[in-house]
Image (tube, rainbow, N blue to C red):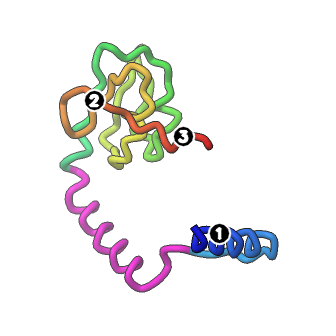
């Protein structure tokens, strides 16, 4: 617990002093990001088409507003995908009807809603 208290004190001091910490900009993070980018470029066209929206969809538009890749859109009274999925699973986790499937053509058993508020 003492380590957590020290870290919290240091972070609060940095924030109040205007110090901005940048994470993920070391050599290892940059190399991993480069490898991941190459893999995404190679395999993304294959899995981008694996998005299904079933009949339980109520067109609440949450998935459309949350999609960072602008993959989902409303057209003709239903939600469609544009083969541009980034596999972030935000649409699956936020769909109130669990009507969206990505990669696996079956309903999600659980949804990740984020950390509980303290």
* Label 2 Cα crowd, 10 Å radius (few <14 / some 14-19 / many 20+): few
Marks 2 and 3, how far apart in space? Answer: 19 Å
Which of labels 2 and 1 is toward the front? 1
- Residue indicated by mark 1: 5
Return the residue nearer the eye: 59 or 22: 22
Instruction: Identify the residue at horizontal 65%, vertical 74% (top origin).
Output: 6
Relative height, residue 81 to residue 5 (above, below): above
Q: Position of residue 52 (x, y in %)?
A: 26, 29
Chain part drawn in magenta:
23-45
* Label 3 Cα crowd, 10 Å radius (few <14 / some 14-19 / many 20+): few
Quadrant for the N terminus in the image: bottom right
Q: Position of residue 64 (x, y in %)?
A: 47, 32
Marks 3 and 1, how far apart in space? Answer: 21 Å
- Residue indicated by mark 3: 116
Which of labels 3 and 1 is toward the front? 1
**Label located before the other in sequence (2 or 3):** 2
Return the residue nearer the eye: 37 or 16: 16
Relative height, residue 20 to residue 117 (above, below): below
Residue 8 is left or right of residue 27, and the answer is right
Task: State whether the magenta stretch is mostly helix, strand or loop.
Answer: helix
**Quadrant of residue 51 within the rendered picture:** top left
Does residue 92 belong to the magenta stretch? no
Return the residue nearer the eye: 93 or 6: 6
Relative height, residue 19 to residue 52 (above, below): below
Instruction: Identify the residue at horizontal 37%, vertical 33% (top origin).
Output: 111
**Label located before the other in sequence (2 or 1):** 1
Q: Position of residue 110 (x, y in %)?
A: 32, 32
Instruction: Identify the residue at horizontal 34%, vertical 45% (top origin).
Output: 84
- Residue indicated by mark 2: 109
Query: What secondary structure is found at the residue carrying circle 1?
Result: helix
């Amino acid at each position: 617990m003492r380590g957590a208290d020290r870290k919290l004190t240091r972070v609060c001091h940095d924030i109040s002093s205007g110090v901005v910490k940048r994470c993920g900009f070391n050599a290892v993070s940059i190399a991993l990001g480069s490898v991941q980018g190459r893999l995404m470029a190679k395999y993304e066209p294959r899995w981008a088409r694996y998005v299904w929206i079933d009949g339980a969809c109520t067109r609440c538009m949450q998935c459309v507003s949350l999609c960072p890749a602008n993959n989902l859109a409303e057209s003709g009274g239903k939600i469609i995908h544009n083969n541009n999925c980034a596999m972030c699973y935000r649409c699956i986790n936020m769909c109130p009807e669990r009507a969206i499937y990505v990669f696996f053509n079956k309903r999600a058993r659980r949804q990740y809603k984020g950390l509980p508020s303290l």
